[in-house]
Image (cartoon, grey):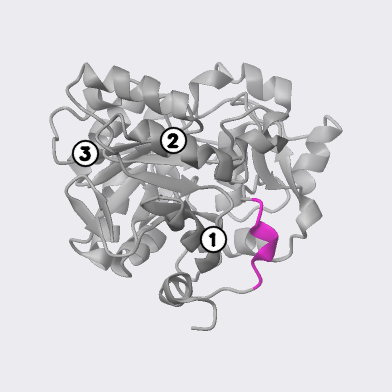
């Protein structure tokens, strides 16, 4: 059992948040129902239900951050996930680098989320936005013991310590907390980061440490539990489920990917991101990618499209296309093990494999 704040999760397995629209109500609700912790991605909620909750749309995109991070869309996703999992603990992942971060944290609290997970930056002021909701557990994602120390020190000013901390190594999908070169260095691999973070956690009420990045099966889970972790977070493997909110085209891209197709890609966020080399990446490499027009204003580091133009693609638009099933122009994030997905099974079946082993 994994305990985060006041919440008890039957199995020490957190399903990682995947935006845009890869982990929403169906996936997160089903994982929580089966005894793990389902995580709704708060990224791109304006796309939910065919942009029904985006009040302003242009070129089939939510306009600006208030629509890209739609409050109404998030509320509806949480409501529909609750119909699946009932009162079981339910989480959301909110990127610290996103525009309107503080507002979305408050939205998630008001929507009835139990646990908020934040990465993509150091969320040093996260407790400020959830101050009116003391029962909501707050969990930062870090890539080093130093980052945990910095966050915990800053949070003490708010009278709060992390309810758990997720340590994400450089084999995860999407954006990394390391430079391109550091992703390949032995010292930054998850197995070498975990002991340092566990040691630092002892200084902060033994905050539970959760391992993430490249975790695939029960053997991996057991390995990190034996190292002293309270649980694990895994995302990519949950894409291979019937309940995953991703389009059929998205799942097909991963099912047909070979190991050599999964790369660290340049991103407008300023850090490398792991995904599948597809037609989009080939076009970007030739400076022939889709025009960048910054409709959604999704993340602060992009500087209203400046970084997107420099890199060659808009991350909001391209993740939106992946969610919509547009293989030619979509951006398909995956962890390093994405090529190992060979079938689509139910969340129930997957959880049984993760808890009992692959022969179950």
Residue 244 coordinates in the image, percent (x, y): 48, 63
Whether residue 339 appears in magenta in the rendering, the answer is yes
Q: How many labels does the image show?
A: 3
Q: Is residue 163 above or below residue 82?
A: above
Q: Residue 109 carries which label?
A: 3
Query: Which residue ends up furthest to the bottom in the rendered image?
Result: 360
Residue at numbered disc 2: 197
- Between the C-alphas of marks 1 and 2, the distance is 18 Å
Q: In this view, does 304 lie above or below 282?
A: above
CA separation, marks 1 and 3?
Answer: 32 Å
Task: Say if mark 3 contacts mark 2, CB within 8 Å.
Answer: no
> What is the spatial separation of the Cα atoms under label 3 and label 2, in whole angstroms?
28 Å
For this rendering, which residue is in front, 55 or 36? 36
Residue 192 locus on image (x, y percent): 57, 40
At mark 2, the secondary structure is helix
Look at the image and tell me in which quarter the N terminus lies.
bottom left
Q: Please say if 345 is above or below 108.
A: below
Mark 1 or mark 3, which is nearer to you?
1
**Residue furthest right in the image:** 286
Q: Are marks 1 and 2 in contact (CB under 8 Å)?
A: no
Could you tell me residue 343's position as x and y percent? 62, 74
Q: Mark 1 points at which residue?
A: 220
Report whether 312 appears left or right of 360. Answer: right
Residue at image position (41%, 47%) is 210
**Residue 186: in sight, yes or no?**
yes
Q: Quick check: is 144 in the magenta stretch? A: no
Residue span colored magenta: 336-342
């Amino acid at each position: 059992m994994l305990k985060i704040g006041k919440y008890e999760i039957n199995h020490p397995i957190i399903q990682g948040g995947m935006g845009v629209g890869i982990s929403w109500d169906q996936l997160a609700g089903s994982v929580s129902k089966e005894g793990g912790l389902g995580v709704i991605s708060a990224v791109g909620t304006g796309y939910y239900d065919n942009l029904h909750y985006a009040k302003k749309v242009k070129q089939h995109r939510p306009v600006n951050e208030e629509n890209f991070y739609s409050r109404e869309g998030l509320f509806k996703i949480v409501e529909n996930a609750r119909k699946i999992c009932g009162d079981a603990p339910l989480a959301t992942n909110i990127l610290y680098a996103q525009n309107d971060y503080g507002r979305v944290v408050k939205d998630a609290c008001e929507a009835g989320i139990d646990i908020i997970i934040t990465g993509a930056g150091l969320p040093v002021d996260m407790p400020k936005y959830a101050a009116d909701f003391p029962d909501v557990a707050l969990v930062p994602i870090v890539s080093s013991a130093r980052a945990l120390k910095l966050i915990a020190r800053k949070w003490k000013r708010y009278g709060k310590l992390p309810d758990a901390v997720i340590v994400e190594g450089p084999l995860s999908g999407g954006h990394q907390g390391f430079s391109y070169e550091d992703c390949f260095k032995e010292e930054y691999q998850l197995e070498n980061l975990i002991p340092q973070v566990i040691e630092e956690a002892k200084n902060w009420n033994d905050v539970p440490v959760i391992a993430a990045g490249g975790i695939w099966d029960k053997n991996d889970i057991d390995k990190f539990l034996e190292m002293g972790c309270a649980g694990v977070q895994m995302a990519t493997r949950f894409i291979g489920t019937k309940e995953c909110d991703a389009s059929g085209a998205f799942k097909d891209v991963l099912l047909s990917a070979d190991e050599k197709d999964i790369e660290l890609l340049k991103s407008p966020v300023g850090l490398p991101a792991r995904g599948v080399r597809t037609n989009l990446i080939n076009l970007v490499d030739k400076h022939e990618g889709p025009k960048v027009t910054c409709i959604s204003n999704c993340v602060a580091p992009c500087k209203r499209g400046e970084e997107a133009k420099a890199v060659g693609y808009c991350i909001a638009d391209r993740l939106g296309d992946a969610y919509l099933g547009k293989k030619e122009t979509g951006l398909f994030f995956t962890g390093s093990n994405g090529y190992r997905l060979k079938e689509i099974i139910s969340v129930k079946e997957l959880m049984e494999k993760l808890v009992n082993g692959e022969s179950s």
